[in-house]
Structures are given as structure tokens and as C-alpha cells.
Amino acid sequence: MEGEKPTSEQVREWYGEQDEAGNDLEWLRYNLSLTPTERYRKHQRRLYSVHRLREAFRLARARKAGGST
């Protein structure tokens, strides 16, 4: 029924195996299967993406406000 809170079984189906704190165990296992270098490179790519997004938002706000870049 619409608006009802999902059961814990439904949540497990949606998000996979979790520990008591709600951490995704499948994702943790995957990350631990990578070498430290692979994990570092993955982190660096995501960090770069965050920086690019921040800059894009900053530029969009500046354009909306009519300011300069």
C-alpha cells in the first residue's frame, strides 16, 4: 500500500546484504577485492568528478546571478 514503511525484508531485497548499521556488505567485499592501487585510482577518479561538479555548479550560479566567472 502507498505510503507504508517497507519491511526489513523488502529493504534487503532493494539494497542487498547489510550489516546491523546498514553498510552494504557486497560493496565492501568488492572494494576489498581490489588492490590498494586500484582503490586509490578509483578514489582519485571520483574525487576529480566531485571537483568538476563543484566547478560546474559554481559557474551555473555565477551565470544565473549575472556575475562573472
Image (cartoon, rainbow, N blue to C red):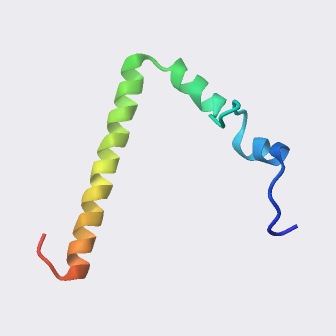
Q: Residue furthest right?
A: 1
Q: Which quarter shows the N terminus?
A: bottom right
Lateral position of residue 20 relative to residue 55, left or right:
right
Q: Residue shown at 13%/69% (left/top)?
A: 69
Q: Residue shown at 82%/48% (left/top)?
A: 10
11 vs 60, nearest the viewer:
11
Is residue 14 depicted above or below 21 in this figure? Answer: below
Q: Residue furthest left?
A: 68
Q: Position of residue 15 (x, y in %)?
A: 70, 43
Is residue 66 depicted above or below 14 in this figure? Answer: below
20 vs 52, nearest the viewer:
20
Give the quarter of the image for residue 3: bottom right
Q: Residue shown at 35%/29% (left/top)?
A: 41
> How many numbered badges does the structure rendering display?
0
Lateral position of residue 7 relative to residue 30, left or right:
right
Lateral position of residue 66 relative to residue 6, left or right:
left
Q: Position of residue 68 (x, y in %)?
A: 11, 74
Q: Residue furthest front?
A: 21
Is residue 44 depicted above or below 40 in this figure? Answer: below
Q: Residue shown at 37%/33% (left/top)?
A: 43
Give the quarter of the image for residue 23: top right
